[in-house]
Image (spheres, rainbow, N blue to C red):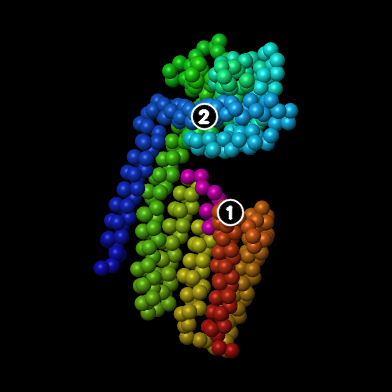
Amino acid sequence: MSLFPTRLPVIAILASVSLAAAGFAWEISRFGTTSAATRARLEDDVRRRFAERTRQVEWLAQQVAARSSAVAEAAASRDPSARLFTTLSDLANLAPYGPASLSATVYVVAGPGMYRVLAWSDGPAEDVPAERLSGSQQLFIAQGPRGPRLVSVKPIEREGRRIGVAAAEAVLSPPTRVGLGDYRFDTSFGPVLISQWYGGGSEPAAGDDRFLVSGPDGPLLEVQFSSAELADQRRAFRRRELAVAALPLVLALLLSSAPLLDRRRAARSSREFDRWSAAAAAAMLLGAVILCALATWVGAPLALTEGILGLAAVALAYLFPVSWWWRRDRRLFPRQAPARFAAEQILGGVGVGGALLAASWIAATRMPETALNRWHSSLFPIEGTSLLTISGIRLTELAIGWTAAALLAWLAARWRL
C-alpha cells in the first residue's frame, strides 16, 4: 500500500512527537526541572572531576613513595641511574581513573629544612615550596605559569627515617588566565572559572553563582559560574531537540514531491507537465528553506546551509531545464517563426551567459581560501566544515552547469535548422 497521501503524515507526526518526548526527557535528565537543579548538577560535575584528579595525584604520590629502596639507592649514588627516571615516567603513564597531564618528582633531604630534586618524570612539573615538603602528607593547590596545579606530597620513609618526599601534580586548567587569579576549568556544562581559595573571605551562600571545592584539609578552590549562561545552554539544548523533532515533518514534506513527480510523468500536455513540476519544486524549496531555518536556529555552521542550498539547486535544475530537454516537444522550423526563433536564441544566449557569470562569481567570492587550501593535497585529514562548504559550492556550480547545458540542448532540439 502506498504511503501517500495519508500514512506518511501520520508516521511523520508520530516520529516527531516521539523525538520531542525523548528530547524533553534528556533535557530533564541533564539540566533538571529548575535552575537550582541545574546549578546542583554543575556542582556535582565539578566536584566529580576534581575528585578524579585528586585520586590520580594521590595514587601517583603513594606509588612513588612506596619505591623507597630505589630512592635510597639513587640518593646514595653520585650519578643516579636512569632506572628511577624511567620508573617515575612509567608510573605517571599508568595512573588510573582516566588520562590526565600528570607528573611525579622525587625530592631528597639536602640539609635542615632543605630539599633537592633527585628525579622526575615527563609532564608539567614545577618546584614545590620547601615548607610544603617539610610537612606531612598534604594535598594543596599551587599556582604556576601553566595554570593552577593540584599537588599531592607524601613522605618517603625507609627504616623509620624520612629520606625524601614524593610529589605528584596535575594541571587543573589550561594556561589561559581569564581574570586576576581566575582560570578556566572545563565541565560538561561548559567552562567555569576557578581560583585558589585562601580563606578569610565570605563563603558562598545558597543561590550564589559560586561555590567551594574542598580537599581532605578544607576548601581548596573557589568556582564561579554564570546562571545566565546555564540558562542559555538549556535554551540552546531545547532548540536542538525541537529541531531534531521537526526533521521527520520536513522529510515527509520532501517526500511529498514523489507523487507529484509521478503525476508529472503521466502529464499529457506541456502546461500540465509544468504545473506538476512547479508543485514538486515548491515542496522541495519549502523543505530546503525550513532546513536552512532550523540550521540557523540551532547555530549550525554556515557550511551546512550552503550544502542544503546546493542540493536544492541541483533538484531545481533537474525539475526544469533538464526535464524540458528530455521532454522533446515537436520541432519547429525557423522560417515558420523567424521572430520567435531569434528571440529564443537571444534569450538562450543571455541565460547561458548569466549562468557562466554566476558560476564565476561563486568561484571568486563564495569559495573560502582556508577551506580550499585544506584540499590541495591528496593526504589530508577529513574536516567536516570544509567538506560541506566545498560540496555545497560544487553542487551549486553543477546545477548552474546543468542549466546552461540543458538550455543549449533544448534550443538545439526545439528548432530544426
Please provide percent x and percent y for residue 95. Answer: 53, 35
Amino acid type at circle 2 is Trp
The residue positioned 48% from the left and 35% from the top of the image is 97
Q: Which sits in the foreground, 45 or 315?
A: 45
Figure check: 242 above or below 411 = above
Disc number for residue 262:
none
Amino acid type at circle 1 is Glu
- Foreground: disc 1 or disc 2: 2
The residue positioned 69% from the left and 25% from the top of the image is 76
Taking the view exactly as shown, the residue that stands out farthest to the top is 200
Whether residue 309 is visible to the viewer of this picture, yes or no, is: yes
The residue positioned 67% from the left and 56% from the top of the image is 373
In the picture of the structure, the residue carrying the numbered disc 1 is 383
Q: How many marks?
A: 2
Please provide percent x and percent y for residue 252. Answer: 36, 59
Whether residue 35 is visible to the viewer of this picture, yes or no, is: no
Figure check: 72 above or below 389 = above
Magenta residues, as a range? 298-307
In the picture of the structure, the residue carrying the numbered disc 2 is 59
Instruction: Specify the quadrant of the image occupied by residue 146.
Output: top right
